[in-house]
């Protein structure tokens, strides 16, 4: 019997057991949780999503508490967990799930969703993101910081056109995670050499995207008389 044909409860139980083993530094197998995510996201099974919500909600709450300005934000971690998991589901349901062929890539994207949701409640987002992006592309940072972060990320996502690369971009630029942190925190993650390769690929994609360069260059306020 294949894993795809097993009853949902069996898959959910195995995912829970292997997640617990992973955090206890024991041997774990990612295929069970990947299959649970596949049923929840690719197949749209509501009961499967309920299981993923229950299993990963504690980890999502822990990630939320690691946000730099977390203590200055009012909503409870449970609110962040709910919003992040719903955002994760909406962004990866259906065919969009196919861009993430491994569990570590799914969890990295889930972590990115957590920080995006928490950042939306932060009145003082880290503006260094824009400078870092301009540095990657190779243009001088401008003094104007009146830029819509969501619009910026839309441009980047279109330029990269790859789920794994977009996840790495967010972990690298938005959340300032070093390769060692990604490897340690995201279910083993990619190895350092692979992360370095992906970051070089990100640079090449962004440097040659003319629309993104124009977007960053052409954002000074109009001159008024």
Image (cartoon, helix red, strand yellow):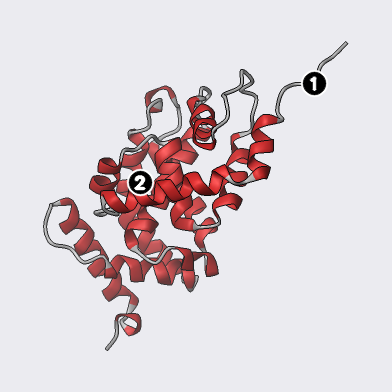
Q: Position of residue 128 (x, y in %)?
A: 48, 25
Q: Quadrant of the N terminus?
A: bottom left
Q: Nearer the viewer, residue 190 or 185?
A: 190
Res. 98 visible in picture: yes
Q: Position of residue 135 (x, y in %)?
A: 50, 31
Query: What is the residue that sits farthest to the right in this orientation?
Result: 225
The residue at 28%/70% (across/down) is 31
Query: What is the residue that sits farthest to the top in this orientation?
Result: 225
Query: What is the residue that sits farthest to the bottom in this orientation?
Result: 1
Quick one: label 1, few (<14), some, or many (20+) residues within 10 Å? few
Foreground mark, 1 or 2, reads: 1
Circle nearer the N terminus (1, 2): 2
Q: Position of residue 191 (x, y in %)?
A: 26, 53
Q: Residue 148 lies in what quarter of the image?
A: top right
Instruction: Provide the residue designation for mark 1.
Output: 222
The residue at 15%/58% (across/down) is 21
Instruction: Provide the residue designation for mark 2.
Output: 60
Q: Nearer the viewer, residue 53 or 184?
A: 184
Q: Which mark is residue 166?
A: none
Q: Nearer the viewer, residue 41 or 182?
A: 182
Q: Position of residue 169 (x, y in %)?
A: 45, 44
Position of residue 185 in the picture relative to residue 224 (left or right): left
Name above or below for residue 163 compared with residue 175. Answer: below
Q: Secondary structure at mark 2?
A: helix
Q: Secondary structure at mark 1?
A: loop
């Amino acid at each position: 019997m294949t894993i795809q044909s097993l009853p949902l409860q069996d898959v959910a139980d195995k995912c829970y057991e292997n997640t617990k083993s992973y955090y206890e530094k024991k041997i774990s197998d990612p295929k069970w949780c990947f299959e649970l995510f596949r049923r929840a996201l690719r197949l749209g099974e509501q009961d499967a999503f309920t299981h993923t919500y229950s299993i990963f909600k504690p980890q999502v709450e822990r990630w939320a508490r690691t946000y730099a300005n977390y203590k200055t934000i009012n909503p409870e971690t449970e609110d962040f967990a709910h919003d992040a998991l719903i955002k994760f589901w909406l962004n990866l349901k259906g065919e969009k799930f196919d861009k993430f062929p491994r569990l570590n890539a799914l969890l990295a994207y889930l972590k990115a969703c957590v920080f995006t949701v928490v950042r939306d409640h932060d009145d003082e987002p880290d503006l260094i993101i824009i400078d870092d992006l301009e540095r990657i592309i190779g243009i001088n940072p401008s003094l104007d910081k009146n830029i819509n972060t969501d619009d910026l990320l839309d441009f980047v996502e279109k330029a990269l056109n790859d789920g794994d690369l977009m996840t790495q971009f967010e972990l690298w630029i938005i959340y300032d995670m070093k390769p060692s942190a990604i490897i340690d925190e995201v279910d083993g993650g990619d190895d350092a050499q692979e992360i370095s390769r992906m970051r070089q690929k990100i640079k090449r994609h962004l440097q040659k995207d003319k629309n993104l360069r124009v977007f960053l260059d052409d954002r000074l306020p109009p001159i008024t008389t």
